[in-house]
């Protein structure tokens, strides 16, 4: 749905809700895709959200809508539905999405739902909830097709038709031994093109791309993207097949991880803030700005330390913003490149020296270019070669140092298993601001012999 169509839908829903035109509303919401309804939900009140949700007649559509709406909007929708109806809605969605939703609900509601489900579903959901929601186990689907090596192609096709017709996404047929350990995989295309009497062991692929149940979801996404898979099997450390992660979930992972990194790099937390209240948005952003605040205070003390120098050479103040700005920009560029490289697996930790040296070299070239340029500006403006030399030296050293800090800090964070995107926000810019001010005044004090 385009932005214009979204606006039309939202305006129409608001107008009909205001008029209490229930019949027309029911007709519209039942003809609109749940994903488009979910986008409109962000701009409606909780009471309006509950009203629209209850007008959706198809349980499966209600399930998709629940999956798509924001976590903060979920309680108001769930509270408007009785427990039995909610259970019947959840039973229409995949097990991994069901587990995710139960985990997002208040504990008492989630427990009540689990108790109301049939035993098999409740046990499956309970097992999925034991895994970290950022791991392969937390996002996997426990429904898959797995048969023994001796099964023939004809038997496999009959089995799929009779016993596995309701599997969410039938992309691959997995082959396991008698202990349930993954030994091979074959595509459905291969299954229908071989002779019916051919056993799976004759045409299955034994070079399998898989992930462990405790693998991070980013690793899962990288494997699916790298090998162009539609699904990737999830195994335990004994190689027993536990589930699969499908490409639709991987798309969500890539989007969420990219958004999280961008928000962290901007220093505004790691969760969406545009749909949250003023108080919640403030609470999220407040601690992230602490580093910048403390860095600013420290920079103030550094300037205060050089107060006598600044009093004698007032013109130094004119170049403080440009030196801090150039250093901050280079540091942000270097950190962004490194964070992106680490996220996409294009930069390896063992290449830390090579990566840092490359960024330092780039920073030095940029520093020399802009150092000469700003030195000329300083000389033309104040007719002082010493000031030109101070500005040029400060720019060169600041940009080299910024490139070093911007590339090194994210890699050090990654080394200690801390999200490197955190380093690319206030930490890098604050560190560079402090160092650039110190270098600038130190050079000035030395060259002007103060």
Image (cartoon, grey):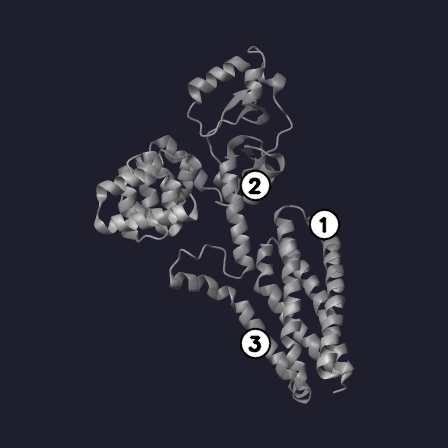
Q: Which labelled disc corresponds to residue 221?
A: 2
Q: Which labelled disc corresponds to residue 350?
A: 1
Q: Percent from the top left, x then y, of residue 433?
A: 63, 71
Badge 3 or badge 1: first in the primary sequence = 3
Q: Percent from the top left, x then y, of residue 325?
A: 63, 69
Work out which quarter of the rendered image holds the C terminus and state it. bottom right
Residue 29 against residue 41 in the figure, above or below: above
Q: Nearer the viewer, mark 2 or mark 1?
A: 2
Q: Percent from the top left, x then y, of residue 356?
A: 72, 57
Residue 58 against residue 157 in the figure, above or below: below
Measure the C-alpha gap from mark 3 to mark 2: 41 Å
The picture quadrant where one finds residue 63 is top left
Left or right: 320, with 98 as reference point: right
Q: Residue at x 70, y 77 (%)?
A: 440
Tell whether label 1 touches label 3 (CB within 8 Å): no
Work out which quarter of the rendered image holds the N terminus and state it. top left
The picture quadrant where one finds residue 362 is bottom right
Q: Residue at x 42, y 35 (%)?
A: 95
Which residue in the protein does label 3 denote?
297
Residue 437 against residue 2 in the figure, above or below: below
- Is residue 82 among what the camera can see? no
* Mark 3 secondary-structure assignment: helix
Q: Which labelled disc corresponds to residue 368?
A: none
Left or right: 191, with 54 as reference point: right
Q: Residue at x 31, y 37 (%)?
A: 30
Q: Residue at x 68, y 49 (%)?
A: 347
User: Is disc 3 surrounded by few (<14), some (14 to 19) or many (20+) residues within 10 Å?
Assistant: few
* Mark 1 secondary-structure assignment: helix
The picture quadrant where one finds residue 192 is top right
Q: Percent from the top left, x then y, of residue 132?
A: 49, 45
């Amino acid at each position: 749905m385009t932005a214009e169509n979204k606006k039309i839908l939202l305006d129409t829903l608001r107008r009909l809700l205001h008029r209490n035109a229930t019949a027309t509303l029911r007709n519209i919401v039942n003809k609109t895709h749940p994903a488009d309804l979910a986008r409109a939900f962000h701009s409606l009140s909780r009471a309006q959200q509950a009203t629209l949700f209850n007008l959706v007649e198809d349980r499966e559509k209600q399930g998709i809508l629940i999956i798509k709406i924001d976590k903060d909007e979920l309680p108001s929708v769930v509270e408007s539905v009785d427990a039995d109806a909610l259970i019947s809605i959840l039973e229409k969605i995949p097990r991994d999405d069901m587990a995710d939703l139960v985990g997002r609900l208040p504990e008492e509601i989630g427990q009540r739902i689990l108790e109301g489900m049939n035993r098999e579903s409740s046990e499956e959901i309970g097992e999925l909830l034991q895994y970290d929601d950022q791991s392969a186990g937390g996002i996997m689907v426990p429904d898959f097709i797995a048969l023994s090596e001796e099964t023939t192609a004809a038997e496999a096709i009959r089995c799929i038709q009779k016993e596995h017709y309701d599997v969410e996404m039938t992309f691959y047929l997995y082959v396991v031994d008698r202990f349930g350990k993954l030994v091979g995989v074959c595509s459905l295309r291969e299954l229908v093109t071989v002779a019916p009497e051919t056993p799976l062991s004759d045409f299955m692929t034994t070079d399998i791309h898989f992930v462990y149940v405790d693998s991070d979801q980013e690793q899962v996404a990288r494997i699916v993207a790298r090998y162009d898979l539609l699904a990737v099997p999830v195994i335990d450390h004994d190689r027993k097949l536990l589930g699969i992660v499908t490409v639709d979930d991987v798309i969500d992972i890539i989007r969420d991880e990219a958004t999280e990194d961008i928000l962290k790099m901007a220093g505004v937390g790691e969760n969406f803030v545009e749909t949250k209240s003023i108080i919640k948005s403030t609470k999220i952003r407040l601690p992230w700005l602490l580093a910048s605040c403390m860095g600013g205070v420290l920079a103030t003390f550094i300037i205060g330390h050089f107060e006598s120098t600044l009093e004698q050479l007032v013109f130094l103040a004119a170049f403080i913003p440009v030196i801090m700005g150039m250093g901050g920009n280079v540091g942000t560029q270097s950190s962004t490149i490194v964070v992106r490289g680490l996220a996409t697996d294009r930069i390896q930790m063992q290449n830390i020296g090579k990566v840092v040296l490359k960024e330092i070299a780039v920073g030095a070239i940029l520093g020399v270019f802009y150092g000469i340029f700003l030195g000329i500006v300083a000389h033309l403006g104040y007719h002082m070669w010493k000031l030109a030399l101070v500005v040029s030296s400060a720019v060169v050293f600041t940009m080299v140092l910024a490139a070093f800090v911007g590339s090194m800090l994210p890699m050090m964070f990654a080394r200690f298993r801390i999200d490197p995107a955190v380093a690319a926000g206030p930490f890098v810019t604050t560190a560079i601001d402090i160092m650039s001010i110190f270098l600038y005044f130190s050079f000035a004090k030395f060259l002007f012999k103060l």
